[in-house]
Amino acid sequence: MQNKSGSLDSQKTKGAPVLKKITKDKLFALALLTPGFIVTVMFILIPVFDSVIKSFQNYKIKNIIAKTPGEWNNFDNYAKLFSNNKLLPSIEVTFIFVCGVVISQFILGMAMALVLNSNLKGARFIRSIMMAPWIVPTIISGLIWMWIYQPQYGLLKYIVNLFSFGHVTDFAMLNNPATALFGIAIAALWKQIPLAALLLVSGLANVPDETMEAATVDGANAVDRFFHITIPYMKSIIKVTTSMAIIENFKQFPLIWTMTGGGPNNSTNTLAILSYREAFVSNNLGSGAAVTTIWMLLMIVVVVLFNFIFKDTSME
């Protein structure tokens, strides 16, 4: 009994320094990381707070030139945006653009991912060149698509003229309010689909081959296997990919500004474009900050709701 108690006491005395060392290491790491974490959070939030504060002020270019602070005007900036019918149409255009691009990006990206994950001939070649559009800078891709849509000598005009047998000779995608946003959406998809497809291909690797084989033996067809096995196993990567797409298109500015500048007739005037116009075209930084604040709040609400609705479910 003494030997046993002695061995237990020795184990306790040996384990105590180890526990103390682990605790000290954690405290030391926490002491090092906490200041950096606080600085990082403050670095991210300071511009947000500054924008929110300026959204309640009459803050214009003259305040910057004269180095004078803005005058507090409560909710006047927000009230003017609603009264002059600028904000609500921009919100509508933004949601139409985001929903259209995100849904199309997922469908086309998933189709490309399935092709790249198959043994289809040419899949390796597609995989080797698929990231080229994503590498191209956004402004350059906007200029490329502007040349394609050019109403006098653009490639699209030639194709439309060819397939209409010469009956349609005047086709200007970006000059028509009914088609301008659709034209920008195509350019956005061209640039964003490769990255989405690459992420979804990595998600397809999480689908067990044994489960797919067992479902095939049980008589499940390709459609049933896709919706009942592939999609559930890919749910986490689908959620990440879609969340990234929502954020990317909510804040889409360079592409739209390069291609249409928000026109024609404000048909492509998203919240990003409206914010820039109010702040740097109308020289009203307070109004631009108000648009930015609403824009950020809507984006956060949409992303949070999306992640809440599409919760992860564990696969047994």
Image (spheres, rainbow, N blue to C red):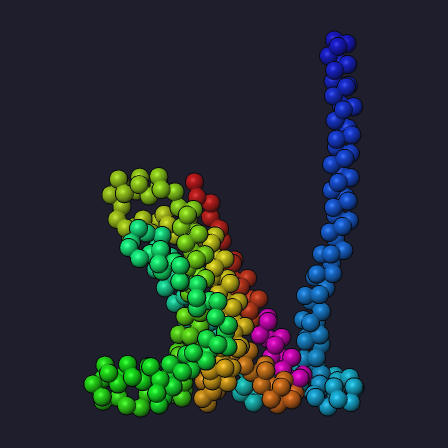
Position of residue 313 measured from the top left corner of the image (x, y, whole percent): 46, 48
Q: Which residues are magenta?
A: 285-297
**Residue that extends furthest to the left in the rendered view of this protein:** 165
The percent coordinates of residue 31 (x first, y second) are: 78, 49
79 in relation to 31, above or below: below
Residue 281 falls left or right of residue 176: right
Residue at 39%, 58% in the rendered image: 127
Between 263 and 228, the residue placed more toward the observer is 263
Residue at image coords 78%, 30%: 17
- 227 with respect to 219 (left or right): right
Q: Is 178 situated left or right of 142 in this image?
A: left
Task: Provide the major secondary structure of the magenta segment.
Answer: helix
Q: Quadrant of the rendered structure where residue 147 is?
A: bottom left
Count of all numbered marks drawn on residues in the image: 0
Say which of 123 and 61 sits in front. Answer: 123
Answer above or below: position of 260 versus 29: below
- Quarter of the picture containing the C terminus is top left
Q: Residue at x 74, y 86 (%)?
A: 64
Q: Residue 12 in magenta?
A: no
Q: Quadrant of the N terminus?
A: top right
Q: Is residue 110 visible?
A: no
Reply above or below: 234 against 155: above
Is residue 307 shown above or below 74?
above
Q: Position of residue 254 (x, y in %)?
A: 53, 77
Measured from the top left, where is residue 220 in percent x and y?
A: 27, 46
Q: Quadrant of residue 68?
A: bottom right
